[in-house]
Amino acid sequence: MANEVGSAPRSTYPRNALELSLARIWEQLLQVDRVGIHDNFFDLGGDSITAMSLLARIVAETGHPLPGGGLLQAPTIAQLAATIARGFDPASWSPMVPIQKRGTARPLFCVHPGGGSVLCYLGLSQCLGEDQPFYALQAPGVDGILEPLTSVVEMAETYVAAIREVQPHGPYNIAGWSAGGVIAYEIAQQLLAAGEQVSHLGIIDSGVLYTLGILRAVSPDDQPGAFEMMGKCPADQIKVFRKRSARAKLIPDEADDEMAIQIMQLFQSNVQAIVSYRPEPFLGRVDIYQAEEALVRPKRQPFAEWQEFCTDIRLHSVPGNHLTMIHAPHVSGLATAMKEALTSSQV
C-alpha cells in the first residue's frame, strides 16, 4: 500500500504536462499517494538505486536524457522539469557534481566507478555528515550524448581541472570506489606532479587487476575478447549484459534497449581504460578500504596489488562485499573508516 504524503497545497500541484508526467513516475517508484513539485526526491525515500530507475523511466517516457548528477542537483519535480526544458548544452557540461557543498571540513572528491554515474556516492556522503563537503566526478558519456574518455590519464586530466575549479590548491582529499579508485590514484599522481599536496588518497576496493576481476564478473563473457564485442551491441548481447550486470545493478529494469546500449558502451570504454593503465609509484600515504567479503576470488586483493607501487599504505577492512559496501547498511562502516582516515591524514 502506498505511503500517504498528505494533501499537498494547490501551489505544489504539477503546472504542465512534463511536471505531471514526472509526478506520476515519482509516485509509482516511491509508492506515495501524492508528490508536490517542490518535494525532494531523496527526502521522500529515494536512494541511488531508485534514482537510476527514475532516470530510466524519464528517458523512456519523455525521451530526455538526464545524467544521475542532474537529479542530485535538481532533486525536485520543479527543478528537474526546468532542467529538462532547458535542454542539454555540451559547452556547459562539467564532470563535477556537488553532492553536498555545506561544511567546514576540507572537501572530498570521489571518482565515478565503471558505470560512469556518481549516484552510488549518495549514501556515503550522507553518512560522512553535514560538515563534510562532498563532490563527485561523473564520466563524460553518462548522459549518452558526449563521447567517453578513453584513457585513465585523460580522465584524470579532465577531472583535475574540474577539481581545481572548486579547490584551486591543496591539500586535496581524493577517493574512488571500484574503477574509480584507479582513476583517483592517477588524479593524485597528477596533483603531486603539479606541486600540490594530497592529504588523503582513498582507494575503495579497487586495483587494476582486482577491478578487472570485478568487471569481468558483470561482463557478457569471461574472455577479454568479449569487451571488444560489447560495442557492437547485438540484441542477444544486450540481453546477456542485462543478466550478467544485474548483480551490480548497472542497468535499471526500467531501462529500454537504447539506454542499456549507452550504459554498456560506457562500461566497455571504462573497462578498456582501466586494463590499459600502468600505475607509477606513488610518493605519499594511501588509504585502502577493502571489503571484508569476497565477491570474486582474484589472484590478489587490492592491498597486495598496491604494495607494488606504494610504501605508505593504511589498510581499512570494512563490512560488505565489493557491491554492498557502498550501500546501506554497510556504507556506514565505510564512512566510519573514512572519517578516521580523513581526520588523521589532514596536514
Image (cartoon, helix red, strand yellow):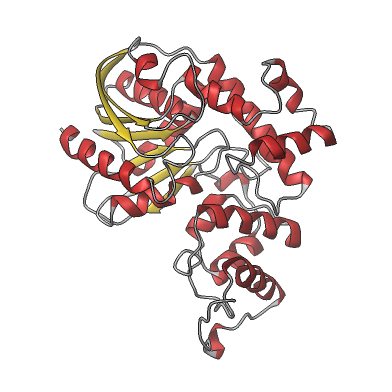
Q: In which quadrant is the C terminus drawn?
A: top left
User: Is residue 151 visible in this depiction of the protein?
Assistant: no
- Please tell me in which quadrant of the rendered image residue 107 appears: top left
Q: Looking at the image, which residue is at 45% across and 29% down?
A: 294
Residue 113 location (% of width, % of height): 51, 35
Left or right: 39 as drawn, with respect to 150: left
Pick the front one: 295 or 68: 295
Query: Residue 275: horizontal and vertical position, in percent?
Result: 55, 17
Give above or below for 308 relative to 266. above
Residue nearest the observer in this picture, 232 or 199? 232
The residue at 64%/41% (across/down) is 246
Position in image of residue 166 (x %, y %) = 35, 44
- The N terminus - image quarter: bottom right
Residue drawn at 52 percent across, 89 percent down: 9
Position of residue 7 in the picture relative to residue 220 (left or right): left
Q: Residue 288's spot in the image, x, y percent? A: 32, 27
Name the residue rendered at 60%, 28% in the picture: 217
User: Is residue 314 shown to the viewer in this render?
Assistant: yes
Number of labelled discs? Answer: 0
The answer to whether residue 101 is left or right of residue 220 is: left
Residue situated in front as seen by the camera: 323 or 81: 323
Picture quadrant where residue 339 is located: top left
Q: From this viewpoint, which residue is outermost toward the right?
A: 235
- Quadrant of the image occupied by residue 24: bottom right
